[in-house]
């Protein structure tokens, strides 16, 4: 059987923020300064001595909601309590990472790798807060666009040579050879790009705006990764821009109702595609069945054109 993707041991780069942070520190991959805890009282004592803003992260997977940027120590302590005492994210909160707050532009970087060759994908930016203007609680992602307007050849070179390639080499050194798609959540600071987190997969909703720009057949790339011959593949990307906007249920990321009929899917304009997430087919009708329901995506010659098509 041929499988595209990382092994269970390799995916720990995403499933454990403590493991990922220790890996980055050991191999000098630029990242935020942090300390990890498995003891609630020690974490609480440490937090009380810090200066906000400060970031509190559940160690494990939490559906994109396990990272809290606290603007005050009481808010940070509440987040810590929710994660470690109330177990808001279950076992994912058995350990936490307390991290310095980085300032800059956030960006998602991606690369295909067969554990040897590393071929960057186009980068993207996504929006976590539920409301316009970056307001409201974090979600799994409310929309994204590619490429970032601030992306430059110099920045792309730095991300590849200082972050993505060293991460793949580090995983190889640790006996966890990484194959598939490596996702680096980055903050572009005044001191260069720094890693916020790694994911062992295509991003969501970033995949919806990066893959439409891929000109090379994705299956050819996947087979090359499986066969350890990625370095022989010429991966080409469109020069167009792509914008995706998530349509979510009212109330998300809190409680919401489902079962509403979705119409208009059969009358989309050219260059517009809809990716389904929280939907189901029932009696010939498409109904809502989740929080993030659809991602509407459009390509255009530039971001403004793509964005206009999406909202239309």
Image: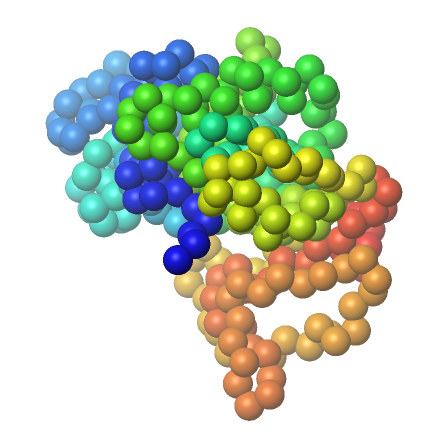
Q: Position of residue 7 (x, y in %)?
A: 34, 43
Quadrant containing the N terminus is: bottom left
Q: Residue at horizontal 30%, vertical 44%? A: 8
Quadrant containing the C terminus is: bottom right
User: Looking at the image, which is closer to me, 20 or 53?
Assistant: 20
Q: Residue at horizontal 54%, vertical 29%? A: 118
User: Looking at the image, which is closer to me, 106 or 198?
Assistant: 198
User: Looking at the image, which is closer to me, 268 or 130?
Assistant: 268
Give residue 269's quadrant in the image.
bottom right
Residue 128 appears in the figure: no
Residue 290 appears left or right of 13 = right
Residue 235 appears in the figure: yes
Give residue 172's quadrant in the image.
top left
Residue 199 appears left or right of 203 = left
Q: Residue at horizontal 43%, vertical 26%? A: 168
Q: How many marks?
A: 0
User: Looking at the image, which is closer to me, 22 or 38?
Assistant: 22
Q: Position of residue 40 (x, y in %)?
A: 15, 31
Residue 106 appears left or right of 201 = right
| Color theme of the render | rainbow
């Amino acid at each position: 059987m041929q499988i595209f993707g990382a092994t269970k041991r390799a995916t720990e780069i995403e499933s454990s923020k403590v493991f990922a942070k220790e890996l980055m520190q050991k191999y000098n991959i630029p990242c935020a300064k942090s300390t990890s805890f498995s003891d609630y009282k020690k974490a609480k004592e440490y937090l009380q001595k810090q200066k906000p803003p400060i970031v509190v992260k559940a160690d494990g997977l939490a559906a994109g909601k396990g990272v809290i940027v606290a603007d005050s120590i009481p808010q940070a302590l509440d987040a810590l309590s929710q994660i470690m005492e109330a177990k808001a994210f279950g076992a994912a909160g058995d350990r936490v990472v307390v991290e310095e707050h980085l300032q800059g532009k956030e960006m998602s970087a991606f690369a295909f790798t067969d554990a040897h060759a590393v071929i960057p994908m186009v980068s993207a930016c996504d929006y976590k807060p539920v409301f316009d203007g970056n307001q409201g609680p974090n979600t799994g992602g409310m929309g994204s666009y590619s490429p970032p307007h601030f992306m430059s050849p110099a920045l792309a070179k730095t991300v590849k040579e200082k972050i993505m390639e060293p991460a793949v080499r580090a995983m190889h050194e640790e006996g966890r050879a990484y194959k598939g798609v490596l996702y680096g959540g980055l903050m572009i600071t005044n001191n260069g790009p720094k890693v916020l987190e790694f994911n062992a997969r295509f991003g969501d909703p970033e995949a919806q705006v990066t893959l439409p720009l891929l000109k090379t057949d994705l299956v050819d790339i996947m087979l090359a990764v499986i066969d350890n011959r990625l370095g022989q593949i010429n991966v080409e990307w469109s020069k167009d821009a792509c914008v995706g906007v998530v349509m979510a249920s009212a109330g998300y990321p809190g409680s919401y109702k489902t079962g509403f009929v979705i119409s208009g899917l059969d009358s989309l304009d050219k260059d517009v595609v809809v990716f389904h997430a929280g939907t189901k087919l029932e009696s010939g009708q498409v109904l809502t069945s989740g929080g993030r329901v659809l991602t509407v995506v459009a390509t255009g010659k530039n971001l403004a054109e793509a964005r206009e098509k999406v909202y239309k």
